[in-house]
Amino acid sequence: ASVNFAREERLAIAIRSGGHNVAGYAVCDGGLMIDMSLMNGVRVAGLDHAFVEGGATWADVDAATTPLGRATPGGLISATGVAGLTLSGGIGWLRGSHGLSVDNLLAA
């Protein structure tokens, strides 16, 4: 409904996941911001897959994977949104051994 409203009113749309972007890409003047932060679920599936919702931060991912002894090449700062960081490549602590976040994305 929100996207249809924005389209009908010819409004720019910004998607806010973690809202960490210092350039302000999570907001748009005179437009519509869709805040995904309540869609922050993370479900670990087996030893090598996780399903991460669009508003999850890397802190959410770490909270779900660390107790299982698993890790993922996420962001350097845990408050960063998974979706935004991954869409921009995703530089994290494990990039040397496991690549960027986007290199590990199986589906969106």
Image: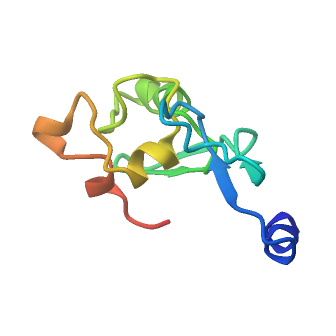
- Using residue 75 as the reference point, say whether residue 98 is left or right of it: left
Display coloring: rainbow
Nearest the camera: 42 or 36? 36
* 87, above or below 42, in the image: below
**Residue 77 drawn at (x, y percent):** 41, 22
From what the image shows, is residue 62 above or below residue 106?
Answer: above
* Residue at point 53%, 30% (across, down): 20
12 on left or right of 48: right
Residue 6 percent across, percent down from the top left? 81, 67
Q: Residue furthest front?
A: 30
Residue drawn at x 86%, y 77% as measured from the top left: 8
Q: Determine the image quadrant of residue 26.
A: top right
Residue at 79%, 68% (x, y): give it: 3
Quarter-wise, where is residue 4 in the image?
bottom right
Q: For the N terminus, which image quadrant?
A: bottom right
| Residue at left offset 75%, top offset 51% | 34
Pick the front one: 11 or 108 = 11
Q: Residue furthest left?
A: 96
- Residue 8 in the image: above or below residue 62: below
Instruction: Give left or right: position of 103 versus 35.
Output: left
Give residue 12's position: percent from left, percent from top: 70, 62
In the rendered structure, the answer to whether residue 99 lies left or right of residue 90 reads: left
97, 92: nearer the viewer: 92
